[in-house]
Image: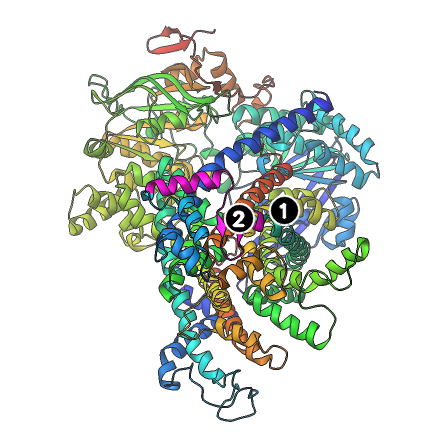
Amino acid sequence: MTGWPAFRRRFLRNPAGVFGLVVIILMILTALGAGLLFPASPLSITGDPFIWPGQSPAHPLGTDILGRDILAGIVHGARVSLIVGLAATAIAVILGMTLGVCAGYFGGLTDVVIMRLVELFQTMPSLIFTIVVMVSLTPSIPAIVLAIGMTSWPQIARLVRAETLRLRNSEFLLTLKVLGLSDLRIIIRHLFPNVTSIVVVTASIIAAQAILLEAAISFLGLGNPNMISWGSMIGSGKEALRSAWYMAAIPGMAIFVAVLGLSLFGNGLNDALNPQGTHK
Amino acid sequence: MTQEPILDVADLRIAFRSAGKSIPAVRGLSFNLRRGEILALVGESGCGKSATAQAVMRLLPEPPAEIAGTHALFEGRDLLRLSEAEMRNIRGNRISMIFQDPLSTLNPVMKVGDQIAEVFVRHKGMGWDAARKEAVRMLDLVRIPEAARRASDYPHLFSGGMRQRVAIATAIAARPSVLIADEPTTALDVTIQAQILELIRSLQREEEMAVLFITHDMGVVAEIADRMVVMNGGQAVESGTTEAIFADPREAYTRTLISAVPRLGAMNGFGQPMRFPPPGRIDTPPSELLMPDTVRADERPLIEVRNLSVRFGGRAGLFRATGSSVHAVENVSFSIQPGETLALVGESGCGKSSTGRAIVRLNEPTRGSILLEGRDIAGIRGEDLKRMRRRVQMIFQDPFASLDPRMSVGAAIAEPLVVHRLLDRKSARTRVLELLAQVGLKPEMADRLPHEFSGGQRQRICVARALALEPSLIVADESVSALDVSIKAQVVNMMLELQRKLGLSYLFISHDMAVVERVSHRVAVMYLGEIVEIGPRAEIFGNPRHPYTQRLMAAVPIPDPSRRGELRSVPLNELRSPVRPHGYEPPERVYHEVAPGHLVMKAG
Amino acid sequence: MSGSGGRLNGAINTGIFVLRRLVHVLPTMFLILTVNFFLLQMAPGDAVDVLTGEAGGASPEIVEMLRKEFGLDQSTGMQFLRYVQNVATFNLGYSVGYNGHVAPIILERIPASLLLMFTAIVVALIVGVTFGVISAVWRGRWIDNVINVISIWGFALPLFWLALMLIVAFSLTLRWFPASGMYNVYQGHTGWAFVTDVAYHMVLPVISLSVYYLAIFSRITRSSMIEIFGQDYMRFAKAKGLHPARITLRHGLRNALLPIVTITGLQLGAMLGGSVVIETIFAWPGMGRLAFDAIFRRDLNLLLGILFVSSFLVIIANILTDMIYSALDPRITLK
């Protein structure tokens, strides 16, 4: 690695990664501008039901069973996906990095306890766990973020732990110990920066998974009923699958593009961070 | 031995394409290999010797490799222009190859017998049953005990030396006329190296093979090669018979290489450590190279290790009836005077590194005491431990792995100064520049990142960082082992110079007997976690008494072809394991003092 | 060592291994129970209110029975003990929605779910690994690019949406495959006809469920094959003059299977989750479909039971994975 400019050059050379970045930026802009573009609630009825895409200029993507505008739903739905994706990933990264580094660096009982927790959350099927959380708490965005964050951090923790274990026995960290650096300084100044690159790549995958998971939960009807989300749009579109399949198809495309963007961005980051392609 | 060339390489050119540029690795190399001879291709890392070997076998992926040349004639056919299908019939059949690292050469999930049998099935048209029988015969041929039983074992159950034997058996199974050996002994301990060299030489005679032997080690060349080609920067700089080149090297580069090779016994008659001659000046008189006496023998010992034991692992647990533990270090005692260098020598797994790490408290000693200037540091922690770290520092083997890739070397050197609150930021900067100068680096290098330096420079940076705390003792764990010979000589000279200027003591841990002879005042030989012999350097090298010390000395290759075969006949036994059943107590050891300060463990 | 003796020893070792692993998972199961209990406590109202109220009311006898079962008159600690005790005797409580004990309701649904998941995993493994090998061998060629696109798309497709679109295309429009159920209840097939009928019903759910995992296996296989191609033993195999197909499959793929097995083990939990959605869409009579019904009826106790049982299934599957791994890797012995 030779600093930020070289990294940026390598990243920008990869069209798929740049596409991913563009998708993410568009999604952020859409989410931020949703209120300006469609000031009315996306849940309000604005036209006749069952208008197919392209039939009416007022509803470019058509309307759903109740006559709600699909484009407005897509634009507002980006908010939920984005918030859930980012917040759940933030929880996963913070928990995963801290616990992963502690487990790998201190070993012993700390490691045993943390790995037990990792095992616990990797054993419980994340979707079923999230469902149970949503049923026992009131369905809300914080609840879903918490549930997804709780089930995602073990991925990061495992990865960080493995990397920390590798580094802990490397001459690099042994030297720092001999030089008299405190554990805290070694972890913060030397370990964290060296595990960041693998965490960043995994984080983009986790954000993608979080969006998929949130969509599945809303599809099952467990989301916040007062907020429109892509998953809930598919769920209501399912009822008219036979006569108006576009209602389910369009929000699905939105999810697909968002997740595709995140994973391409992650791949692009990975290639730019490990130019030899030898690392994972 | 006939003079007819079996492999004739003319004007070989190899380049590697990277980021649109073509970077040449071999530039017009010509040599020929004659029937039944051993030809060495010698040079330092990056000289193109391995690329040459792989190009002849057409193993380099093209692209990125670009291979051109007049020809590489083998049995009348040009290897550079054969189709891949034709090459497949030659590889492993007419020309075979073995590689450097025996631990990774064999497929970990395939029985070793099957890996050999594959060759018979592929090239001799045998059925699997017949091929497996032949494989057992091959294992027998390379002297693997109980060949029939071991054929159905997987590689991980074999030691490094044994795995290299399996690789050799695979390579010669189809009775090829050429064997290419790419650094086949570099990853092995000296006694194992001696056995493998012996095996290659005797198989070469029995099977009448020609061997292309690729190595960086002049000692090995002198030991095994009939003729040699010295390579530098992708070209041959000198070639001829091994005797002629060692007797009278024509080129300055060859002279430098030969002079940089430490010679066991070169120090007979000198009491003090001695620097290596500067590049190109082999004939520098010893008096100019000899170091003054730096040992302050009348002072109290800087460090005294008493009955140190380090054991790892091995708890008995639920459902696990018996536990075992690794007795890495067992009842080791020694001391080091201020200004003195004690070398700890031995082969991999003998416990020398564990001893070094215990002294800098990277390993917790299981038993015993470590007195630093009279105070026991075995159990200290917190501030005491931090203070101790200022007195004792350590340098590791791999300079590429020892530095944080994201931190400029200036910041890396300054870090210990800041952490120990020795200097403020501004004076730390001045001190960093001083330290860089001390290890022979330029001040403007302080702002660069580690990857911008060569291996030798990086090791200098590591030394500078260790010196920042002004320690009295530096534990140097194989610190020059990974370096090319010429670089190794320079770093060793620098370390000796620092000892003279700063009065440092070294615990010099190494498997390289010849370097040890150069740098040390006293030597301790370790075997299976114990010191079997310790004493003044001249005594250990001139009058080794313990059988293991004698075997170790005998196995070291001598860079002098006229003394070839003088050593050899090392018995075929591998290093035993220091893994002991739980609760094992080693027997009481008795040491004999055979000369003043020269102690030998009594057999038993 | 005689062959039969070795086999006997092997069987004993395997037995000890399974036993030790089961002992090892006890703390994990205990933790899962704790989480379950915690979730039950988090729900508004006392447990019985949650269990009965939202399920649409229940008879006073049942309420009384539940209160006793949960020991709600006692302290939280005692309630927890009671809960653990119940689960330890495989009493997962009472489902108000289904008016019966949770454990048998779930057990009845397990075979259908396992059939669906096992088939999907096998399909995903076979196709994914094949894709990955092809992709690694012809790295950078058009076929690699095509497979990369497939696997990236497969990863990004929400599987429930894919299921709906498959239904639109192959069931509603083309009428090739049925859109719901596990077998045709009206025909009353038996024997071989029943098997083919089930297989016919499985096509769409299996495709929907396997695409995501196919993408993952393809990527893992590709990257581990590429890593393995750089290993010394692959170079040595080439230096022996072996045919590229043998080098790739016998030496390369055989080693690449190890990380694939590990990943398969880690993905099992996610797959159980995925099957909830797929079973819901295709009205597949498995545990997932049951979970959906339980959501609908806000039957928390049944959901907790499903979470517990599915976690247990994942644990069993992981033990199996470890055994397969050790069979594939001679360096690992079961311990």
**Up/down of B191 relative to C311, above or below:** above
Q: Nearer the viewer, residue B459 or B380?
A: B380
Please tell me which residue is depicted at 63% across the width and 60% down the height of the picture.
C284
Tell me the chain of label 1.
Answer: C
**Could you tell me which quadrant the N terminus of chain A lies in?**
bottom left
Q: Position of residue B90 (x, y in %)?
A: 76, 44
**Up/down of C31 relative to A133, above or below:** above
The mark closer to the camera, 1 or 2, is 2
Crowding around mark 1 (Cα neighbors within 10 Å: few <14, some 14 to 19, many 20+) is: some
Residue B174 is marked as none
Q: Over which residues does the magenta segment extend?
A: C77-106
Three-letter amino acid code at the position of disc 2: His
- Work out whether residue A129 can be spotted: yes
| Callout 1 and callout 2 share a chain | yes
> Would you say B547 lies left or right of B480 here?
right
C-alpha distance separating marks 1 and 2: 42 Å
Residue C257 is marked as 1
